[in-house]
Image: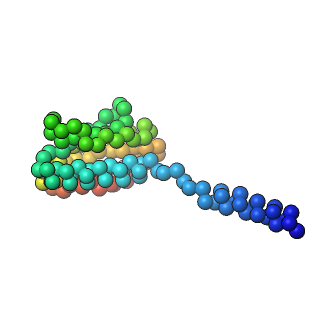
Amino acid sequence: MVVVLSLVFTILTVTLSKIHTPKPPDSLNQFISTLEQDIFSMQQHAITYQSVMSLVFNLDEHYYYIYGSSHVPTKIKRSYDPNISIEFSSITQPIQYNALGTLKNPGTLKVNYNNQSVKLIFPFGTGRFYVSEE
């Protein structure tokens, strides 16, 4: 009886551990979420300190950084998955927010990851972007 219970317990333990194995994070969603949080921080800084804040992507080395004026060091530098590619559709670098927290240069950029493709749309007159799946 003890052997049968031990066997059942072992089988249940192995089965349950496979059921509850967490999925790895989705790199595209994680990238978009992190970028959104960084842009929010960038806007808050621009409004609080009444300064222009800029975001620049380094496409070759797969990171972006956020900085203020030339006298202010980089505020945020963030690497992203090398499998993510970014195409600038109608927006130019640097992406800048003015002291009111609104975009100086609205537009669209396309983000590709594996078989997924989304557009990040930065509309005129707002400080945020929204995501449109293709």
**Residue 32 in the image: above or below residue 15:** above
- Does the image show residue 94? no
Going by the image, does 107 lie left or right of 27? Answer: left
Quadrant of residue 65 within the rendered picture: top left
Q: Position of residue 4 (x, y in %)?
A: 85, 65
Residue at 16% x, 50% y: name it: 46
Q: Nearer the viewer, residue 34 or 49?
A: 49
Residue at 39% x, 41% y: name it: 80
Going by the image, does 90 lie left or right of 86? Answer: left
Point out the residue furthest to the right here: 1
Q: Quadrant of the N terminus?
A: bottom right
Quadrant of residue 132 within the rendered picture: bottom left
Going by the image, does 25 lie left or right of 109? Answer: right
Point out the residue furthest to the top here: 60
Q: Nearer the viewer, residue 132 or 93?
A: 93
- Does the image show residue 9? yes
**Residue 126 in the image: above or below residue 71:** below
Q: Position of residue 57 (x, y in %)?
A: 29, 38
Residue at 47% x, 43% y: name it: 114
Q: Position of residue 33 (x, y in %)?
A: 36, 53
